[in-house]
Image: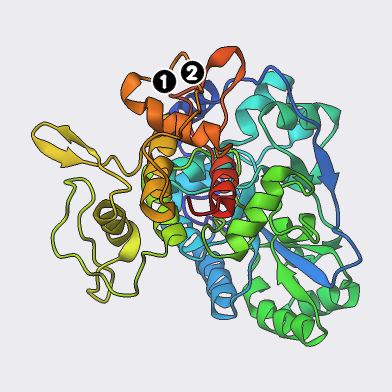
Amino acid sequence: MGMGCVGRRMHLGWIVPVALVVFWLVIRSPLPAYAAPIQTVYRGSDTLPRIALTFDDTFRPEYTLRTISVLRDRQVPATFFVTGWYVMNCPDINEALAAGGFEIGDHTMSHPDLSKLNYEELLKEIGGGTETFAWRLKSRTAPYLRPPGGKAGPLVVQAAAAKGFTHIIQWDIDSDDWKGISADAITQKVLLGAHNGAIVLFHCSAPHTFEALPAIIDTLRGRGYELVTVSGLLKGDRRFVDVPVGTAVSTAIDRVVEEGYMSGYNRDWFGPEDPIRRAQFAKVAVNVAGLHTDQVEFDAATFFDVPRLTDETGGVRAYPFDYVEEAVAAGIIRGSEKDGRRVFQPDSSLTRLQLARMMARMMRSFKGYPEALPGTVVQFRDVPPDASNDVQLLAGLGVMRGYSAGYFQVEAKATRGQVAVVVGRYLDLPAY
């Protein structure tokens, strides 16, 4: 099938680097004590006119980059299942995938026949693609495994679950592009099998896939199908695939997203259990307080680690600089001193105590609440004295709550889901 970025065979020059990366990824991803159930999916629901286009074998730049270009030109969401060896040696393809915002699933580290591996070998292979991609690109990936050749016996399923995967993604329409058939033949194969919830298998290494895609895309859309990622199939009527319906958290997330205070990572993922970064919360706080404007008003940076950054046109990027400066001007955030410089640590995770203090400042500034709520005594063993009034204000009004044994868990990381809940409660508070 050709050599591609570095060829499909292992070359002695990079056996050692790849082996080191595999070792690093394995020790970085210890076996969980409990493996959640994993689902094998061949197709999505037939109740919605959605089809997912999926792509394997991203190792031939001359074909893969053209495939990506077609998808981007036609604004088609798609899911790519990447192999770790190819990710290590095909930087142009990696960057194109990241720039296109495509969903990234796993296609193992070296593309072996998983049915022939033992459990320990499976643990080294499964996750190699997504972990290497996330490491190289600092990009999110989806917890989906596509086994090479679709071979996924019970041991593969067990190992995938142990590595944190939630789904094994198969397909119910094989484009047969890997056989080297013509673009017209690929097009006919896909269009004849098209149906609600279809998962279509393509290979970027095939010579005529990119030629077939325009007709496939245009015809499917002409028939009324929405082209989505695998997550777009799995989520059904939900707003986000990772937010279960019918919970207080999901209700809060739906609200803050609908009202424009927060957003998902993309149209499919919100990350409710992910820690929220300090700069991300500054943006949320500014949105909730209605402080953001279309123009960047600030010339000088308050914090050494939040400089003015420009985009490709020379304009100042609003995030994080402008949002942080707006939050500083409103007294919501303060930062700290380090080595004689004022810093904000924008990429650090926000702690529960920091969240409480910032929310308390908002309650006083924008809703008129006092420094301390009269007649309210809510004490936590781990809250420092200088933050006592802030935490008591929020706890007394039910905006934030503590945990058992009288602890607030001040150093615990505030998650995106928790912030959505807290923001919702803040919005419901009347003015004092």
| Spot occupied by residue 118 in the image (x, y as percentages of width and height) | 74, 21
Is 145 rendered above or below residue 323? above
Residue in the foreground of this view, choosing between 117 and 356: 356
User: Which residue is at the far bottom?
Assistant: 222
From the viewer's perspective, tell me whether residue 212 is left or right of residue 352: right
Q: Residues within 10 Å of mark 1 (few under 14, many from 20)?
A: many
Residue drawn at the location 89% of the way across and 77% of the way down:
192
Q: Which mark is residue 383?
A: 1
Residue 108 seen anywhere in this rendered image of the structure: yes
Q: Quadrant of residue 125?
A: top right
Q: Are marks 1 and 2 in contact (CB under 8 Å)?
A: yes
Residue drawn at the location 45% of the way across and 44% of the way down:
88
From the viewer's perspective, tell me whether residue 163 is left or right of residue 173: left
How far apart marks 1 and 2 lie (CA) works out to 6 Å
Q: Residues within 10 Å of mark 2 (few under 14, many from 20)?
A: some
From the viewer's perspective, tell me whether residue 92 is left or right of residue 325: right
Q: Which residue is mark 2?
A: 380
Residue drawn at the location 80% of the way across and 46% of the way down:
150
User: Which residue is at the far front?
Assistant: 375
Image color mode: rainbow
User: Which residue is at the far left?
Assistant: 340
Per the image, label 2 sits on a secondary structure element best described as loop
- Tell me the quarter of the image containing the N terminus: bottom right
Residue type, mark 2 in image: Phe
| Spot occupied by residue 224 in the image (x, y as percentages of width and height) | 81, 82
Residue 12 seen anywhere in this rendered image of the structure: no
| Spot occupied by residue 120 in the image (x, y as percentages of width and height) | 67, 19
From the viewer's perspective, tell me whether residue 29 is left or right of residue 322: right
| Spot occupied by residue 151 in the image (x, y as percentages of width and height) | 81, 40
Residue drawn at the location 71% of the way across and 44% of the way down:
248
Residue type, mark 1 in image: Val
Per the image, label 1 sits on a secondary structure element best described as loop
